[in-house]
Amino acid sequence: MANGDNNGSPRLIPTPEYLADLARRGDEVYRPMQDELEKQHPGKFIAIHVDTADFEIGATSGDAGRALLARHPIDGRIHIRRIGNEPEHALAARLGSGPILSASNS
């Protein structure tokens, strides 16, 4: 567990189950537009706000994530992946200044 963030608020590390669910929800948003994205933006990255299905595309995962965070609060839940059939990696993160509760910590 991390001791805190820049403003002193406690932060807990998300569980693997939480991250798997976030990735699953992001993939549910990605799948219906996968074919079109792969034709228009192969190899780029997509950041998906899983609660709203809003997304941004960027040359890097950081570019996509920052562009999406410009429209959503820092505590939004975002799934980031490379556009394509076999993504280099998939990222799911809970970004926020407050605590993240898990079953093991409650």
Image (cartoon, grey):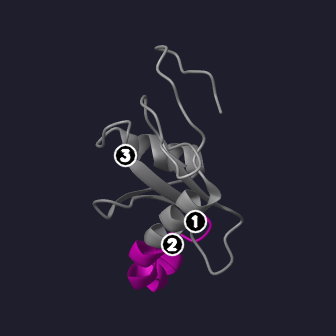
Q: Secondary structure at mark 3?
A: loop
**How many angstroms separate mark 1 from mark 3 (CA)?**
16 Å
Label 2: few (<14), some or many (≥20) within 10 Å? some
Hey, which quadrant is residue 13 in on the image? top right
Q: Are marks 3 and 2 in contact (CB under 8 Å)?
A: no
- Going from N to C along the chain, the mark reached first, 3 or 2, is 2
Q: Secondary structure at mark 1?
A: helix
Q: Which residue is mark 3?
A: 76
Relative image position of residue 22 (x, y in whole percent):
49, 62
The boundaries of the magenta stretch are 27-45
Hey, which quadrant is residue 91 in on the image? bottom right
Residue 26 can be seen, yes or no: yes
Q: Residue flagged by tag 3: what amino acid is it?
A: Gly
Relative image position of residue 16 (x, y in whole percent):
64, 58
Check the image and name the residue furthest to the right.
Answer: 88
**How many angstroms separate mark 3 from mark 2 (CA)?**
16 Å
Q: Which residue is mark 2?
A: 24
Label 1: few (<14), some or many (≥20) within 10 Å? few
Q: Are marks 2 and 1 in contact (CB under 8 Å)?
A: yes
Front: mark 1 or 3: 1
Q: Secondary structure at mark 2?
A: helix
Q: Which residue is mark 1?
A: 20
**Above or below, comparing residue 79 to residue 29 in the picture:** above
Quarter placement of the N terminus: top right
Q: Residue flagged by tag 2: what amino acid is it?
A: Arg
Q: Residue flagged by tag 1: what amino acid is it?
A: Ala
**Above or below, comparing residue 35 to residue 96 in the picture:** below
Task: Answer with left or right where residue 74 lies relative to residue 65.
Answer: left
